Image (spheres, helix red, strand yellow):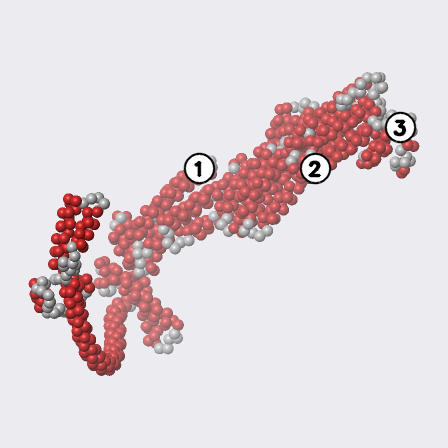
Amino acid sequence: MKESRDGTKSARHAKSSSVTSLPLILDIDDFKGDFSFDALFGNLVNDLLPSFQEEETDSAEGHGNISGTDALPNGHIRALSDTAKFSQGPSEPLFPEVGKLLSLFKDSCKELVDLRKQIDGRLYNLKKEVSAQDSKHRKTLTELEKGVDGLFTSFARLDSRISSVGQTAAKIGDHLQSADAQRETASQTIELIKYLMEFNSSPGDLMELSPLFSDDSRVAEAASIAQKLRSFAEEDIGRQSIAVPSVVGNATASRGLEVAVANLQEYCNELENRLLARFDAASQKRELSTMAECAKILSQFNRGTSAMQHYVATRPMFIDVEVMNSDTRSVLGDHGLQASPSNVARGLSSLYKEITDTVRKEAATITAVFPSPNEVMSILVQRVLEQRVTTLLDKLLVKPSLVNLPPVEEGGLLLYLRMLAVAYEKTQELARDLRAVGCGDLDVEGLTESLFSAHKDEYPEHEQASLRQLYQAKMAELRAENQQISESTGTIGRSKGASVASSHQQISVTVVTEFVHWNEESISRCTMLTSQPATLAAHVKTVFTCLLDQVSQYITEGLERARDSLTEAAALRERFVLGTSMSRRVAAAAASAAEAAAAAGESSFRSFMVAIQRCGSSVAIVQQYFANSISRLLLPVDGAHASSCEEMATAMSSAEAAAYKGLQQCIETVMAEVERLLSAEQKATDYRAPDDGNAPDHRPTTACTRVVAYLSRVLESAFTALEGLNKQAFLTELGNRLHKGLLTHWQKFTFNPSGGLRLKRDITEYGEFVRSFNAPSVDEKFELLGIMANVFIVAPESLSTLFDSSPGIRKDAQRFIPLREDYKSAKLASKLASLWPSSS
């Protein structure tokens, strides 16, 4: 059809110039596949359009010639040519193929309608045909489903049958296998009974046995059979012993099996000894394959325990006495008594490394020889620890008696404890190394702990005894040093001697630091030797209590020695108190002695302040040590931390009491010197200067200057030594005592107005000094004293105004107004009676 259509198109193209055209022929194939309307349309019109296209081409060429000669840039020439073209009139149609195309399109439409009708007809026929085929197919499927159901039923019956046959076959196979096993067992039993009868012949007669039991090439088989026979015979004897024999035959059988058991035992022992001898010979030659073969056979005798133990026991490190002696020499040296912990540590490290290397080499051999190397390694490591290490530790650690302590000159208890710590640490390292090499199921850590159990039972008591021994030795050393210094210095004088003795017996922070170092070392040993946190906390608390007792006793005794110097200085002051009536020579000697006593008191004051300062530093060191090292170790036990804090406060209470008493003595010492200076330096004319017309003296009195200078000098050590609330309390108490002492002192004098000004100048000087105390209550008292001094300065008629403006001075003013020079002449008693009626 395609070819006929192409021929028609060619014919139509050949007759394109004719007026009428041939009918249009379309094919259904044109609409199949990738249909393109543009392609279809092109095939229809391409036969008619070429003539028009040729005319258009010719017309375009003519226009091109015109434009090539007469064209202007604005395009007017083309417009004129077009006008001329239209002015010529309708000589021919503009699109001459229109008629042909219209006819072509109409024919094409008719053809398309006819094609659609053909297609619709074909579709109808196909639908009918498809419907018929579908009905036929459905019928076929229904029949197939019935057939498949039947097949499924048949298959189910077949599967059930196959399963039943398979189970039957499996049962038959099991029975066959069981029967074969029974046959094999029966065969083996027959063989075993035959061999058992051979061993049952007569006691001790092993000459008539089968060649199997004497053939060296079949030793493994013989050993296996012998063990089976032995097990069987022993079990039968056990059953016969439980059941009551009722016939003679049972008793005869039992006696026969006993003979067999005895012979089997004898044979097994002989075979085992023979194998062990062969194993030893192979071991000496390092024939590992022969050793492994013997070990494998021997594993059938008591699981090879005898072979394992025999191998371990024959190692040179356990049978050579020289090895043990060499161990001792390498750790303790040739003499042993001069060994120090550091040398012992180096010796143990070297020795334990050698032991580890030896065990590692043995492990390689054991792995290649024995079927169960882990069990052999367990026996080997246990033997190393229990024999070689224990022998060394027994020589290294000799537990001292707590009744008769070893002398300090020979190291004392501390040397034993340090040796114990070194040995424990190094042995623990050995245990870890042996664990890494391999030790089977052996609890090597627990075994290592058991080596030190005898030393750890009384370990806390040894630590406490050691700390007490160290403390006593240190105190004896300090006393010897002080005695030596005292003897070398000689007796210079009682007061000076007391000062020198005091300076050489001062509290030393270095000594307290040494106490802490002892305790820190002891705590480190506790931490190493104690694994349970609760037990460790108890030991730490006990050891720390020793430190508290030592520091408390040491600083308390130091403070008491410093107090003794203050007491001696006070006794010197009392001895040289100036009397009221004595000669000038005696008074001068007494004054000189009083100044010496004052110098001793000042020296004692400084010494006590140094002791206070060092006491505070020592307590701070202990508290810092507790916070950094002790407190965290006490946390596992409830209440242990709080209990230790309470014990620390209790331990320091005695030192606090001594410090409080000493500070009171210091205040007494200072006030005694202040009173001495005031009595010696204060003149009656200081506050009642004669009215000679000269300008009043506005300088402080000599007594005031001396007292302030003394206080500045002596309290310099107090400002340095005391801190915080202690400093505030001490200076407040001293300021109050100074205030009270000055009031008492000034009541001995009479004041005129110029003397009042001098007194106010002294009060200002005292007030400026005590302001350095930072005690507000003391500052307030001296401010009131400055105001109170005005009672000597103002005119009598102005006193009431003074009291009204400063009511706080009324109480002291009642005592000081009678000290005015004009008290009687101005009749101040009657004038002021209205101010305080109770005193009139």
State the quadrant of the N terminus: bottom left
Place residue 134 in its image quadrant: bottom left
Residue 692 sits above or below residue 145 on the image: above
Instruction: Judge from the rendering whether residue 195 lies leftward or rightward of residue 460; answer left or right.
Output: left
N-terminal-most mark, 2 or 3:
2
Q: Percent from the top left, x then y, of residue 788? A: 81, 31
* Amino acid, disc 3: Tyr
Residue 636 sits above or below residue 328 on the image: below
- Rounded to the nearest angstrom, the CA distance separating label 2 from label 1 is 55 Å
Residue 113 sits above or below residue 693 on the image: below
Residue tagged by mark 3? Answer: 823
State the quadrant of the C terminus: top right
Residue placed most toward the observer, 696 or 127: 127
Residue tagged by mark 1? Answer: 343
**What SS does tag 3 mark?**
loop
Which of pointers 2 and 3 indicates the residue nearer the eye?
3
- Rounded to the nearest angstrom, the CA distance separating label 3 from label 1 is 92 Å
Which residue is located at x 9 percent, y 62 percent? 17
Place residue 232 in its image quadrant: bottom left
